[in-house]
Amino acid sequence: MSTSDDSTYFKFCILAAGRGTRSTALSGLHKALFPVGNRPVISIILDRVPKSIPIVVALGHKSEQIRSYLLSVHHDRSFEFVQVENYLGLGSGPGLSLLKCEKNMQCPFIFTSADTIVDEDFKFSAIAKNWVGVSQVSDSESHEYCLVSTADGVVNDFFYGKNKNSYAFTGIAGVKDFKEFWNGLKQGNIIKGEHQVLDGLRALNNLHTLSMSWLDTGNDRAYSRTKSFYPNDLVVEKKNESIFVDNGSVVKYFDDADKARQRVQRSDYLIDCSPKVSKVNDNMFLYSFHEGQRLSDVNNERQLYEFLLDYHQKFGKNRCKSDSSFFSNCDKMYRQKTLDRIKQYADGPLDKISSVNGIQVSAVMNLIDQVDWEKINEKAIASKFHGDLQPENILVLSSGDYLYIDWRESFGESISVGDMYYDLGKLYHALIVSNSLVLEGNYDIFIDHDLSKAEIYFAVKSNLIKLNQMLQKFCLDMGLEYRHVELVGILNYLNIAGLYGTFQNGDYGNFLFLLGKKMLTQWIEEGK
């Protein structure tokens, strides 16, 4: 649906200066870049606008994140960036941000907040009249929005409060009579501590309503609801990192800038294995999207074994010196990291469960005390490493080559030398629990009301069972210990459980912790 049949020239303005304090889903990331459908909100907004239309972006909070992302990923568009200095405190707000863009928009324009997604059928390709976007909201939610009083499709006024059968202002409006709008906006009335856009809209004659389906991402509840329509189904979500596949690029975001920097540096050690990466900003890098089949979807046993031989050729054969720094990093990656990560579970309610799927389990610290950490270090094989060797991170290209993506930033303090067993352990853990099946909800956890017993269930992909059989054969052929690979993989479940405290209400993290305890118990018993 188009906003008009006319072809009036206009600009499109995105208001992205605010902090977005109501959104806490991803630490350190601007709300305009929150992922929906594996792409940032701002990219979904741009989908509704022809590429010939100039885009004006009001920037303030974390401005470099947005500027660099748009210039790196949407290099096929024309952007005009306007810096808003006063994006915090009394008098700031969307009205002030828009007013700062006045010089850039001496023409008809459409403006939108950076946390609003409208129905994909809408294509904002022209402006023939002044209009505001409206959408009906429930009685219980009406007090959260600016409401619109309307008659016969024309706006009477804007107001706040709880009201039945209400229409909310979606944060999107089309302004044909821009001079009248700017004169009205300069009145600068403060509403709820902010300079709103309402003075400009009220200055327009015959302001029409435009009904639209609307999804809000401006607060945690609304963002969660939006993701039910646009699921992020590439990886299991974490609170401090994200991935986008957008306009031919794959973009990785990390709240920890050191992780982003080290991953870029590490790409120099993976020249023949991984895609070429480019820095976007301190917290992001990108590489070109490559078509290919994920190893997790390969069902050919020969090709599964060929992958292991390819890994050995590119990584395992590249042996390095096992010096004191290597063994220190092994201690960091195995013993120290495990002890640090399980603290949040030790002696807690989940740790006091004594039976998992009928297997008697003791407290996690008791299990950890039975691990021979010195032997783990002794068995370690210093080599070139990937660091996150999961089947989802291996692409089989049409040429038959393998592309290794989403590598780990370091092994302890080293970005060049890791333990081959760490890679194989990561592979093993992902063969037992598939990320793609987890994303589809193919696991479950049941805990007795007295917190003494638990049952966990999960689906296993048949081709990954085959890959596990190939892994056992590979270890036998190469003189490696498959049982040691199992131990490293099991420890990884305990290590990563705490990273998923917010994913699916923490159920996945709890599942991993109980699975890790069960499997470690069985591994210890089998060795007696």
Image (tube, rainbow, N blue to C red):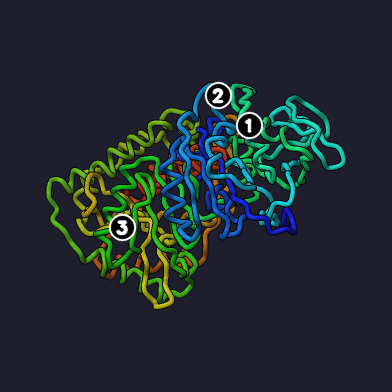
- Relative placement, left or right, of 510 versus 525 is right
Res 145 → quadrant: top right
The nearer-to-camera label among 2 and 3 is 2
Mark closest to the chain's N terminus, 2 or 3: 2
Residue 472 or 160: which is nearer the viewer?
160
Residue 273: % across, % down? 31, 66
Residue 517 or 144: which is nearer the viewer?
144
Q: Residue at x 48, y 53 (%)?
A: 244
Residue 297: % across, % down? 49, 67
What residue type is disc 1 on? Answer: Leu
Which residue does the numbered mark 2 point to in the structure image?
Answer: 91
The reply to whether discs 2 and 1 touch (Cβ–Cβ < 8 Å) is no
In the rendering, which numbered label is found on residue 185? 1
In the rendering, which numbered label is found on residue 325? none
Q: Residues within 10 Å of mark 3 (few under 14, many from 20)?
A: many
Q: Residue at x 44, y 58 (%)?
A: 250
Q: Residue at x 70, y 35 (%)?
A: 201
Residue 55 or 480: which is nearer the viewer?
55
Rounded to the nearest angstrom, the CA distance separating label 2 from label 1 is 13 Å
The nearer-to-camera label among 2 and 1 is 1
Residue 490: % across, % down? 38, 49
Which residue does the numbered mark 3 point to in the structure image?
Answer: 386
The nearer-to-camera label among 1 and 3 is 1
Residue 463: % across, % down? 49, 67
- Relative placement, left or right, of 63 versus 456 is left
Res 448 → quadrant: top right
Rounded to the nearest angstrom, the CA distance separating label 2 from label 3 is 50 Å
Residue 300 or 367: which is nearer the viewer?
300
Q: Residue at x 75, y 27 (%)?
A: 159
Rounded to the nearest angstrom, the CA distance separating label 1 from label 3 is 55 Å
Mark closest to the chain's N terminus, 2 or 1: 2
Say what secondary structure mark 2 lies in. Answer: loop
